[in-house]
Amino acid sequence: MPEGAAGRRTFGPVVLLGLATAALAAVASAKPWIGARATGASDASMSALDSGTRYPLASAISLVLLAAWGVLLVTRGRVRRAFAVLTVLAALGLTVSVVAAYATLPDTARDSFDELMGRGSSDTGFTGWFWTTAVCAAVALVPAGLAVRLVGQWPEMGSRYDAPGAAATATEVSTVDPERALWRALDEGRDPTDSAQRQPGA
């Protein structure tokens, strides 16, 4: 019982932190990660520089991370465990992509600026969007790791959200455990005291 109570207490904060970091990373990774620090840069210069300042891989991975948290929120059993593992892999992938961008993106942006503007621009640096993504990538590892560890203790959604074919399973359970069938009927929104529902042939 204490273990289940602990699972219910951690479910909300962990999932909320996971969703928040993934969503913020998805927004930040879609923005330019390199910017010119020189004053008086024209809009045309910034537009040209922008073509080499994004890192699409990080944006894609952050969207995968966000989707994994969304699916984990509404699934159960082995599927939920699989998506908990996916959150860890996606968080690790996002971290690796941030490190790779830190090593390669400045040269890519500088080359893009040279090619499009006809002159160099060495006075460039990482924008706040890059550092936001970096922080989100590091923090995202925490709820992902907790999800893998605690997912078995977390509450699950009721069977009313299952596919229509799940009704047959409820009928099979009712023949084995009447008390469990009673609670399942309440969970599905049916009246277990209605004899017409309990006895289809009546």
Image (cartoon, grey):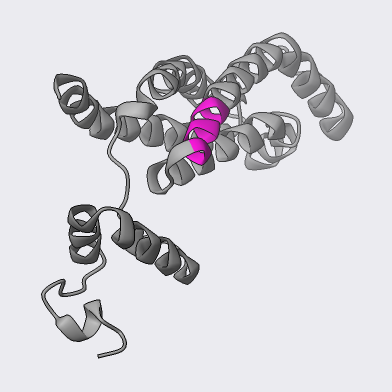
Query: Most prominent secondary structure in the magenta stretch?
Result: helix
Task: Give percent across and percent down for residue 83.
Answer: 53, 35
Based on the picture, tell me whether residue 79 belongs to the magenta stretch.
yes
Quadrant into which the N terminus falls: top left
Residue at 44% of width from left, 67% of height from top? 168
Which residue lies most toward the bottom here? 202
Up/down of 38 relative to 193, above or below = above
Please give the name of the residue rendered at 64% of the width and 29% of the height, measured from the top-left corner: 58
Q: Residue furthest left?
A: 193
The answer to which of 28 and 108 lies nearer the viewer is: 28
Judged left or right of residue 147, residue 111 is right
Q: Is 98 included in the stretch rendered in magenta? A: no
Q: Is residue 182 left or right of residue 158?
A: left
- Horizontally, residue 175 falls left or right of residue 130, namely left
Please give the range of residues in magenta.
Answer: 78-87
Residue 61 coordinates in the image, percent (x, y): 63, 32
Q: Nearer the viewer, residue 192 or 177?
A: 177
Residue 31, image x and y in percent? Answer: 57, 36
Report if residue 141 is visible in the image.
yes
Return the residue nearer the eye: 50 or 83: 83
Instruction: Quadrant for the C terminus, please.
Output: bottom left
Q: Along the horizontal axis of the image, is 90 left or right of 162?
A: right
* Residue drawn at x 39%, y 61% as measured from the top left: 172
